[in-house]
Image (cartoon, coloured by chain):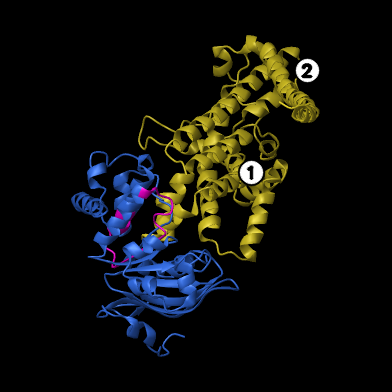
Chain colours: A yellow, B blue
C-alpha cells in the first residue's frame, strides 16, 4: 500500500468514527426515552400487584361487593363487564365492518364520501364522556332502554366504532389491487368480491382492530357512569341460558349492572385503607384482561396471516 | 359515437397475404381517457377468431390500457371514460355500450394478469372460483371442470395430488398456469393476456408460450407483450402502438419482415424503445 493510499484510508476512518459518534448518542437518547415509558408501566403494574396480590383469592372472584373489605369481591363487576363486552361486540363488529367495506368497495369517490371519511376519523378523537351524554339522551331518554347492560354495550359500541371502521379500511387497502381485479375479471359482482375475498383476506386486520377497540372499551369509566351503572350491586343479571323452555333469555340485556373500572373507582373513593387493596387487586384483574385480549389479537393475526402473503 | 357507420380499415384487409379469418372482435375508433389524460387515440383494429393477436410498443404506449378495455376493467376505477366501440362477434354486441353490464362482458372474456395473482385459497378453489361465481354448486361437475381447466393449462400432472394445497405454495410459473386454468375453467370465448410472462423465468415462459399455441385452437387470444421475440414466436397478428396510437397492424410475419412504417421498423430492430 502506498503512503498516499494509507493517508486516504486513515482520513476515511476518522470521518466514519466522527459520524458514528451520533449513532451512539442517539442510541442512548432512544433507550432513555423508551425506559421512561416501559419503567413507568412496570412500576405501576408491580405496585398494584404487590398491593393487590393478597386479595387475589378465589373468593374475590365469586363474592359480591360488601361493606367488609375482606369479604368484598368483584363477581358482579366481571360478569357485568363480560356481558357489556358481548353487547359491544355484537353491535360494533357488524356495523364497523359493514361501514368499512362500504367506504372502500362501494362508495363513489366524491365530496360526500370525503366528508364521511373525515367525520369517521374525527369520531375516534371525540372524548368518551361525550358518547356517554349522547347515550343518555338517545338510548335512555329517547329509546327508553334504561340504565341497562344493553345501553352500556351500545354506548361502548359507538365509542369503538370508528376504531373498527378505520382498521377495516386499512386492512382492505392492504389487499393488492391484482387480487381484487382477479375476482372482478372472473365476473364476480362487488358483493361476491367482498364476501369471498375482501372480507376473508382482511380478517386479521379487522380482528386486530376489534380487539384494540375492546381493550379500550373495557377500561372506559366516564360514559358508563353517565348512563348510570350501579356502584353497589349484590345480584347478577338473569342468566342468558335457562333450564326451562325457551332456554334462552334476553332479560339480562335490560338488567342493572356494574363493570370493573366502576367497581375500582368505587373502592378507591372509600376511606378505609383495606378497600384500596381491593381496588389494586381489581386493577390487576382488569389489566390482565386487557393484556390477554391484546395477546389474543397478536396470536390470531399471526395464525391468519400465515396463509396470506402478498 | 355509438351507431355511426365506421369505414373499413382498407390497409388492413389489403395487406393480408393469406385469406382473412372471421373477426371475433373489433375496436372502432376507440379512445380512452384516464380523467383528462387521453391514453388511447382513435384505435380501430380487428381481432381475428382463434388467432393470437399481439400488442407491442414501448412502455406507456397504451397497450395494457387497450387490452383492459376489452373486459371493462377500467370501470372499476372512477374518472375513466371510453369513446368509440368494441364489437364482439358473432352477436354484434358493443362491449362499451353503457347498457351492457361489465360483469356480462367479463363472463365472456377472461383475463390473465401480468403478475400471477392466485387467491389465497386452495388450488382447487382458485380454478373453481369462476364457476362458483356463476352459481355452480355440483361437486362432480366442478371436479370435472377443474381437471379439464388444469389439463388445458398443462398443470394437471403437477398438482393433481395436491389440489387442496394453498396456491401460494406453487412456483411462479405454476401460479401463472393456475391463473390461466382459472381463466379457462369458464370456457371463455376470448382470452386476454397482459404480459403474462414478464414475471417468469425463461423455462416457465417457454411453457406458457407453448400453452398459447395450444389454446388458440379453441379460443381467440389478445396478448400484450414487451418482448418482441415473444410476439414473433406466438402471434399471428401484431399491432404496434406508440403514445396511445395504433401505428401499424398486420400479420406478424409482415410486421417483422417488412413493416410498413419506419417507426415500427425502428422499434422492432431495437433502434428505438
Foreground pick, B191 / A5: A5
Say left or right for B137 vs A49: left
Which quadrant of the view contains residue A149?
top right
The foreground one among A100 and B128 is B128
Image position, residue B157 (x, y; %): 22, 44
- Chain ID of residue with mark 2: A
Q: Check the picture and name the quadrant holding the N terminus of chain A.
A: top right
Q: Height in image: B225 above or below B171?
A: below
Q: Read off the residue under disc 2.
A: A271
Residue matched to label 1: A159
Q: CA distance from mark 1 to mark 2?
A: 33 Å
Residue that extends furthest to the top in the rendered view of this protein: A54
The region drawn magenta spans B180-202
The 10 Å Cα crowd at callout 1, few under 14, some 14 to 19, many 20 or more, is many
Along the viewing direction, whichever of A49 and A189 lies nearer the viewer? A189
x and y, in percent, of residue B259 in the image: 41, 75
Residue at image location 28% in from the left, 68% down from the top: B189
Above or below, B273 against A123 in this view is below
Callouts 1 and 2 in the same chain: yes
* Residue B256 in picture, x, y percent from top left: 38, 70
Q: Is residue B202 left or right of residue A78?
A: left
Residue drawn at (49%, 37%) of the image: A251
Vertical arrangement, residue A58 with respect to residue B25, above or below: above
Q: Position of residue B29 (x, y in %)?
A: 45, 82
- Which picture quadrant has residue B98? bottom left
Residue A80 in sight from this viewpoint: no
SS label for mark 1: helix
Counting residues from the N terminus, which is met first, the one under dot 1 or under dot 2? 1
Q: Residue furthest front?
A: A2
User: Which subunit holds the residue at mark 1?
Assistant: A
Residue at x 47%, y 77% (from the top left corner): B247
Amino acid at each position: 500500500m502506498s503512503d498516499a493510499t494509507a493517508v486516504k484510508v486513515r482520513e476515511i476512518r476518522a470521518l466514519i468514527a466522527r459520524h458514528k459518534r451520533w449513532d451512539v448518542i442517539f442510541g442512548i437518547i432512544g433507550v432513555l426515552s423508551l425506559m421512561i415509558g416501559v419503567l413507568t408501566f412496570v412500576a405501576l403494574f408491580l405496585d398494584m400487584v404487590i398491593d393487590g396480590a393478597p386479595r387475589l383469592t378465589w373468593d374475590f372472584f365469586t363474592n359480591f361487593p360488601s361493606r367488609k373489605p375482606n369479604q368484598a369481591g368483584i363477581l358482579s363487576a366481571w360478569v357485568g363487564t363480560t356481558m357489556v363486552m358481548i353487547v359491544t361486540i355484537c353491535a360494533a363488529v357488524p356495523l364497523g365492518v359493514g361501514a368499512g367495506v362500504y367506504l372502500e368497495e362501494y362508495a363513489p369517490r366524491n365530496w360526500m364520501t370525503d366528508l364521511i371519511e373525515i367525520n369517521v376519523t374525527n369520531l375516534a378523537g371525540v372524548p368518551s364522556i361525550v358518547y356517554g351524554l349522547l347515550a343518555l339522551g338517545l338510548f335512555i331518554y329517547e329509546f327508553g332502554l334504561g340504565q341497562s347492560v344493553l345501553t352500556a354495550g351500545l354506548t361502548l359500541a359507538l365509542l369503538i366504532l370508528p376504531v373498527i371502521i378505520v382498521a377495516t379500511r386499512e386492512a382492505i387497502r392492504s389487499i393488492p389491487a391484482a387480487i381484487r381485479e382477479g375476482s372482478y375479471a372472473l365476473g364476480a359482482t362487488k358483493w361476491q368480491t367482498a364476501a369471498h375475498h375482501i372480507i376473508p383476506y382482511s380478517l386479521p386486520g379487522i380482528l386486530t382492530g376489534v380487539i384494540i377497540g375492546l381493550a379500550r372499551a373495557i377500561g372506559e369509566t366516564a360514559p358508563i357512569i353517565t348512563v348510570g351503572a350501579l356502584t353497589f350491586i349484590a345480584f347478577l343479571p338473569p342468566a342468558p341460558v335457562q333450564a326451562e323452555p325457551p332456554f334462552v333469555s334476553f332479560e339480562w340485556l335490560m338488567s342493572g349492572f356494574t363493570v370493573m373500572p366502576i367497581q375500582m373507582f368505587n373502592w378507591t373513593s372509600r376511606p378505609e385503607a383495606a378497600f384500596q387493596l381491593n381496588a389494586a387487586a381489581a386493577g390487576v384483574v382488569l389489566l390482565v384482561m386487557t393484556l390477554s385480549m391484546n395477546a389474543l389479537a397478536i396470536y390470531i393475526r399471526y395464525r391468519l396471516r400465515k396463509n396470506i402473503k402478498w | 359515437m355509438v351507431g355511426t357507420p365506421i369505414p373499413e380499415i382498407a390497409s388492413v384487409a389489403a395487406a393480408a397475404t393469406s385469406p382473412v379469418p372471421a373477426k371475433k372482435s373489433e375496436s372502432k375508433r376507440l379512445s380512452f381517457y384516464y380523467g383528462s389524460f387521453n391514453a388511447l387515440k382513435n384505435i380501430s383494429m380487428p381481432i381475428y377468431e382463434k388467432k393470437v393477436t399481439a400488442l407491442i410498443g414501448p412502455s406507456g404506449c397504451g397497450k395494457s390500457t387497450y387490452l383492459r378495455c376489452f373486459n371493462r376493467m377500467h370501470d372499476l376505477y372512477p374518472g375513466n371514460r371510453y369513446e368509440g366501440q368494441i364489437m364482439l362477434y358473432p352477436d354484434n354486441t358493443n362491449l362499451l355500450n353503457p347498457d351492457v353490464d361489465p360483469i356480462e362482458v367479463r363472463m365472456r372474456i377472461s383475463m390473465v394478469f401480468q403478475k400471477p395473482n392466485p387467491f389465497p385459497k386452495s388450488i382447487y378453489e382458485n380454478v373453481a372460483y369462476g364457476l362458483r361465481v356463476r352459481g355452480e354448486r355440483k361437486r362432480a361437475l366442478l371436479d370435472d371442470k377443474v381437471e379439464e381447466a388444469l389439463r388445458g393449462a398443462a398443470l394437471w400432472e403437477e398438482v393433481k395430488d395436491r389440489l387442496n394445497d394453498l396456491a401460494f405454495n406453487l412456483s411462479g410459473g405454476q401460479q401463472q398456469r393456475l391463473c390461466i386454468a382459472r381463466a379457462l375453467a369458464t370456457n371463455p370465448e376470448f382470452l386476454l393476456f397482459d404480459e403474462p410472462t414478464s414475471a417468469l423465468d425463461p423455462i416457465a415462459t417457454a411453457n406458457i408460450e407453448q400453452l398459447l399455441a395450444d389454446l388458440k385452437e379453441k379460443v381467440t387470444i389478445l396478448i400484450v407483450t414487451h418482448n418482441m421475440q415473444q410476439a414473433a414466436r406466438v402471434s399471428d397478428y401484431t399491432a404496434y402502438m406508440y403514445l396511445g396510437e395504433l401505428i401499424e397492424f398486420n400479420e406478424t410475419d409482415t410486421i417483422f419482415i417488412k413493416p410498413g412504417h419506419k417507426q415500427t421498423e425502428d422499434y422492432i430492430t431495437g433502434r428505438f424503445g
